[in-house]
Amino acid sequence: MEPVIDATVYIVDDDADVREALAWLLRSRRLLSECYRSAEDFEVEVLRRPPVVRRPSCLLLDMRMTGMSGLSLFNRMLERGEIEAMPVIFLTGHADIPTAVDTVKRGAFDFCEKPFSDNALVDRIEQALLKSAEHLASDRAREAVRGRLEELTDREKDVMRLVVEGVPNKLIADQLDISVRTVEVHRARVFDKMQVKSAVELANLLRTP
């Protein structure tokens, strides 16, 4: 698997030895990491930071910690829609496995039982980072499409809607009570602003998930 460029792995664990060991493991695999000793610190320092350009990331989260538990932090992230952009991998003890399985059903990326295999954990981290990168790329694509749509005039949007429905220029002209030449001009402007070359390409663009 090709490494995801400019990604960050967040480590949240109240055990300093675990944080150190994980950070060392990630450095050895050329992965950047940031460590936090509590869920509260992570929430304040990362989740509540002012919006910036999002970069691929994932979260290694201890399920049981003093103060706010990893499960509570996960629930907050779930409510705020954070776990697609920042997949969560739980680090759990044997007693936590039923709870960890439930979190996966609710959207956590995975869980790793302590003590965990270094290779298996890094593999899952890289997969989580790839998922994060794909989600962020989809978000950027949607934003780009929304930005292009905002540049269209109301008339161009009317023409675009009918073009996407497959209505011929002559019928568009009749429906909008304009000339065929005017339809052609609006159609060309729509294609230019939306950066497409055909009605099929335009329809596919508007279906961007």
Image (cartoon, rainbow, N blue to C red):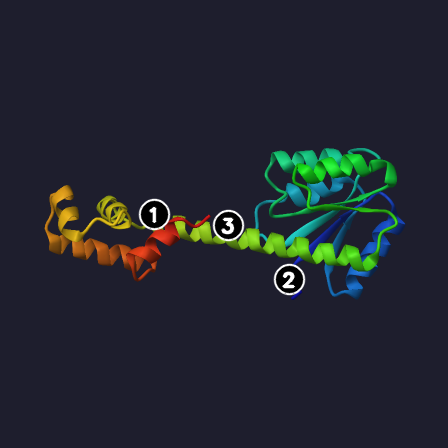
Please identify, in this view, whether the residue under mark 2 or under mark 1 is nearer the observer.
2
The residue that mark 2 highlights is 4
Say if 162 sits above or below 98 in the image: below
Q: Position of residue 208 (x, y in %)?
A: 43, 50
Residue 55 can be seen in this image:
no
Say which amino acid is labelled 3. Asp
**Which quarter of the rendered picture does the N terminus lie within?**
bottom right
Image coordinates of residue 107 in percent, x first then y, are 65, 40
Q: Image point 12% across, 56% down: which residue?
A: 181
Residue under circle 3?
139
90 up-or-down from 76: above or below: below
**Amino acid type, callout 1:** Glu
Q: What residue is shown with label 1?
A: 150
Q: Residues within 10 Å of mark 1 (few under 14, many from 20)?
A: few
User: Where residue 130 sits: x, y (%)?
Assistant: 63, 57
Mark 3 and mark 1 lie on one chain; the one further toward the N terminus is: 3
| 193 relative position to 92: left or right | left
- Give the crowd class for mark 3: few <14, some 14-19, many >=20 residues within 10 Å: some
Label 2: which secondary element? loop
SS for callout 3:
helix
**N-terminal label among 2 and 1:** 2
Q: How far from the left and from the top, in percent, is residue 122?
A: 76, 58
Q: Which secondary structure, mark 1?
A: helix
The residues bearing labels 2 and 1 have C-alpha atoms spaced at a distance of 32 Å
At horizontal 75% and vertical 38% (from top left) the residue drawn is 101
Number of marks in the image?
3
Residue kind at label 2, given as amino acid type: Val
Cα–Cα gap, marks 3 and 1: 17 Å
Q: Looking at the rendered structure, which numbered label has been put on residue 182?
A: none
